[in-house]
Image (cartoon, helix red, strand yellow):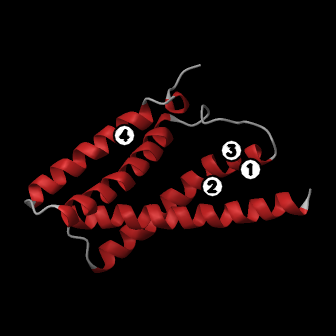
Amino acid sequence: MSIRFLCQVVLLFFLTIAFSFIFTLVLINFLSQILPLEGLVRKFTEGFMLLVYLYVNFFYCFPDQVSELRGRYAGSRRYPAWVRHFIAGSCALIFEEVAYYFISDTWSLSEVLYRLLSFSVFFAFYGYFMSGKEFKGGR
């Protein structure tokens, strides 16, 4: 095992943890605008979602990334359907939050229109991600 490969795996490990935290913070920010998350309930929800993201990233995504570093293509076809939907939904949620803050900072509309426009961005990106070759199930 070379030093370069070891450094890449260590960097990938820390990036996986960082992205798990980022996705958790975005999801909790989104949920706190919809549900009243305060105090202990918020901390429990943050911890639970962080564990879910760490589980998905380390059990499914991390081994595929390491195999790609070694020159083997594993692909995401071995992912269960719920993991595919979870990954696509999380990525679409990032785009939805960016669109929400961009729209709310750019135009002065009502909160309902902000959410409606950002929700349409969420469904557009979710549909785009799920229509990709990597996320289709089957053979």
Q: CA distance from mark 3 to mark 2?
A: 10 Å
| Circles 1, 4 touching at the beta carbon (< 8 Å) | no
Name the spot of residue 133 as percent of width and height, x first: 53, 27
* Foreground label between 1 and 2: 1
Residue 48 in the image, given as x and y percentages of width and height: 44, 64
Alpha carbon of mark 1 to alpha carbon of mark 2: how far? 11 Å
Distance from disc 1 to disc 3, alpha carbons, whole Å, reads: 5 Å
Say what amino acid the circle numbered 2 marks.
Answer: Phe
Quarter residue 18 falls in = bottom right
Classify the position of the C terminus by image quarter: top right
| Between 44 and 107, the one nearer to me in the picture | 107
Name the residue that disc number 2 marks: 58
Disc 4 designates what residue? 126
Q: Toward the viewer: 102 or 11?
A: 102
The relative height of residue 110 versus residue 81 in the rendered view (above or below) is below
Q: Determine which residue is flagged by label 3.
A: 64
Picture quadrant of residue 4: bottom right
Whether tag 1 and tag 3 are in contact, CB under 8 A, the answer is: yes
The picture quadrant where one finds residue 86 is top left
Of helix, strand and loop, which one carries label 1? helix
